[in-house]
Image (cartoon, rainbow, N blue to C red):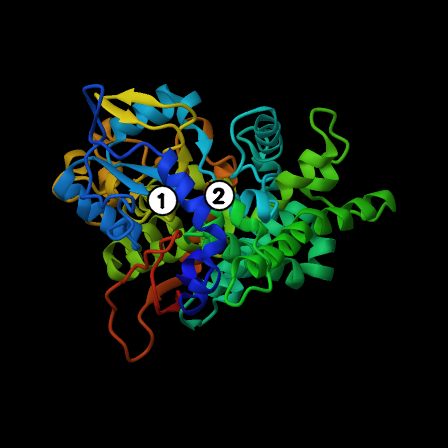
Amino acid sequence: MDGLGISTGRALAYSALITGSVVAWLLSRPPHVHVVGGRRSPPGPKRLPLLGNIRNFPKRWFVEFSAYQKEYGDILYFELPGMSVLVLHSLPDVEELLVKRAPNYSHRSNSYMVKVLMDFEWSVVQQDLGDSHNEMRKVFRKVIGPRTVSDFDPLIEGEAETLQGNLFSFSGDPEQTLMNAVGAAVIKLAYGERVYQQHGEELTRLNVESVDLVTWVRMQLWLVNVFPIARFLPSWLPGLQFPKVVTKGKNLLRKLRHWGFSLVKQDVEHGKADLSVISKYLHEPEFSEETLRDAVALMYMPATDTTSAALLSLFAMLLQHPEVQIKAQHELDSVVGKGRPPKMSDIPQLTYLNACWTENFRLNPPAAMGVPRRVAEADVWKGYVIPKGTMVMTNIGFMMTDERIWGPTAEQFQPERFLSPDASTLPDAASIPFGFGRRICPGRYMAERTGILFAATVLAAYTIVPPEGETSPAVTFGDAFVRKPVDFRCRFLPRK
């Protein structure tokens, strides 16, 4: 039971402390039924009395949910201790619930461990709909929305050239190099060049640790998420894990929230600050200083992993499809020419490269299962009862390779599909991986510009080939929250 925060060997030593709470909860909970008032619960794997689907709930979400879809259809339903889970595999179903019924389906899933104990309720990703959430999204629209995101193009172009230099004759797994490049761009965007030069490495470590810890915690089953009263268990109990995790998380997230912002604010007060989101908008009357602080603190967390994963996936696809890579490079030579790196103003003219980026985003969406939501009030949909508090997951990875939409080549890398006469009839594959409706990623415009320019700059200078003495490897993807190639190796051969 380590995932619950209690080691198996020690669990019995204090189980009596919560037995009364467990029994009371079970007795107060209506027994599971498949038909309520003539209405059914959605289909899904067989459930055990009281325990529900705790034994057959997927551990590898994308792979196993996709396998269940073949057996039960586009709508899957699970019951776990303390929560029910609805998994959607169809774009029309997602449109109906997450867009048309957005007010009821746009809240975030409750994680008492993360939101309350680790004090992360200030995150726009964790917040429910409401004034605070709206104010936070207003910041993102103002500073990196479609009308203002180009203000930081020179910064992104500079970081793309730095990445190009760092990959000179590189051979091996480029994941960390790509993460460092994207991370540097985000931190400089948020806090400026001056703060990055003085504290960049520590800010990067702080963000990486925070991302890794929050992602790991959300993927576990914790005792306090089911029984919040367990938070009162003394931390000295042998084998009790969650108090230590909570302490570490609170300290990391508190520093993430305040430290970088205070450094820039101090530089602004002393007239030393350079261009950054904070220095530019510190005295913006449309939102408070605290809202700006919290929004900027979250720029790194969703952007770095997903953008670097998309780049890594694209390079893997181009290595496996050299004919596509050659076409993209010919287009770059024709549009940009040789002797200078691409600029952001070149990107709209690179139609084939844009199709490659979109096709990679379709075939390998970084967040294949999206970010879970929560149903605010009980609902009835398609004759199914959806209980209040149900966690709603969207299997984006399945939708993006669904043959009913993409045809028999759904699982093949074919950028030409977005250049064909029928391309306008296809779903917006460049947008869907960023989410739906009111919860679409607020940083998508910056992520799109950074990713595609980094890709163009690398391809203009290098040909992606296998490491010397190796053949083009089969690409294996992990099934973590951020889905990306595992142990991918390549070489960046300078173009003649």
Q: Picture coordinates of residue 158 (x, y %)? A: 59, 53
Question: Which quadrant of the figure has residue 480?
Answer: bottom left
| Residue at the far right in the pictured view | 270
Is residue 282 toward the left or the right of residue 413 in the image? Answer: right
Quadrant including the N terminus: bottom left
Q: Picture coordinates of residue 98 (x, y %)? A: 36, 27
**How packed is label 2: few (under 14 Cα within 10 Å), some, or many (20 or more)?**
many
Is residue 275 toward the left or the right of residue 40 in the image? Answer: right
Residue at label 2?
111
Going by the numbered disc 2, the residue's amino acid type is Ser
Going by the numbered disc 1, the residue's amino acid type is Pro
Q: Secondary structure at mark 2?
A: loop
Choose mark 2 or mark 1, whichever is in front. Answer: 1
Is residue 227 toward the left or the right of residue 274 in the image? Answer: left
Residue at label 1?
81
Choose between 112 and 324: the one closer to the eye.
112
